Image (tube, rainbow, N blue to C red):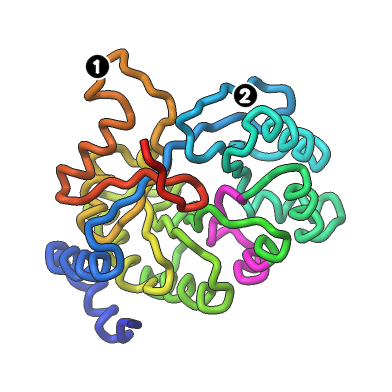
Amino acid sequence: MTVPDAELAALAASHDIIAIGMRADDVRRARHGARTTFVRVAEVDATPGAPVALQAAAGEVRISGTPQGRAAAVARIAEVRAAVGKAPLSGFSLADLEQLAAADGVTLRALLEEFQAAGLELVAEAPFDRLRDPRRSIEEVNIAGLALARLTVHQWPEVEMTAFFREVSAVQRTVAVIRAFAPLPRRFGGGAPSTGYDDVKRVALARIAVENVASIQVDWSLYGPKLAQVALTVGADDVDGVSAVDDVSEGPRRAPLEEIRRNIVAAGLEPVERNARFEPLAR
């Protein structure tokens, strides 16, 4: 149910983070209950010929970095696909692919179709604030036979927060293919960085305002266990970027899988590991 603009504006203007968080948690629990998903990611470099370490625990193999040209990207996708078999394979930023298509003089759809034919299954992220035409570009992903792993925010734009979230929601009403939205910025501007209070409020307002996207996501590797755990209590229900390396050098309780499970349980929630297709995994 869409929250009225007046109510959303009042929440955004409020400094009562506890009340805002409780409101967001109500929305989250009405949709997901205590169920909290997480995905373990194995990242590989976008450079053709770079090593591909096989990690059987990965629910998503992600080609990271900027593609080094169209042919190089296709070659790298084919290399990684051959190495990882049927594992879910994601790669690249949709904003970077917009630029690559323009530089190569091809349509975005043609580029995406070529990537899909080479073995790519998902576009790793779509930074909403960097896309030239978010609705059209996200639609092209779907038309090309690919899925979008997550909608992200590259750097928080100079716009009012609730207006930005309303814009995200409006695009989703048209495309209806966004599965997860990560509202915390992946880069910081030249000014003062955001505070923990800002980040928690942003997650909560995203859950309240973007009612038509199923999952609000927080990045474990980027923001750390502490903020991720708090975010799960104020509206987030999915955790991205958990390491796929089963490192037990510091003891089994500090291994990535046990650490994420322990943090979710400590927040009073139920951990469910998933893959990039949002299919639950039994471990």
Residue 214 position in % (x across, y down): 40, 65
Query: Which residue appears at 46% of the width and 74% of the height?
Result: 169
Rendered-image quadrant of the N terminus: bottom left
Indicate the quadrant where residue 171 lies: bottom right
The residue positioned farthest toward the top in the image shown: 249
User: Mark 1 falls on what kind of element?
Assistant: loop
Rendered-image quadrant of the C terminus: top left
In this view of the protein, can residue 234 be seen by the observer? yes
As shown in the figure, which amino acid type bears the numbered disc 1?
Gly
Residue 162 position in % (x across, y down): 36, 73
Indicate the quadrant where residue 221 lies: top left
Indicate the quadrant where residue 119 lies: top right
Task: Tell me: residue 76, above or below residue 240.
Answer: above
The label number, if any, that marks residue 52 in the structure image: 2
Decide whether residue 123 is among the magenta residues. Answer: yes
The label number, if any, that marks residue 251 in the structure image: 1
Q: Which residues are magenta?
A: 122-139
Sequence-wise, the earlier of marks 2 and 1 is: 2
Q: Nearer the viewer, residue 190 or 45?
A: 45
The residue positioned farthest toward the front in the image shown: 282
User: Mark 2 falls on what kind of element?
Assistant: loop
In this view of the protein, can residue 192 be seen by the observer? no
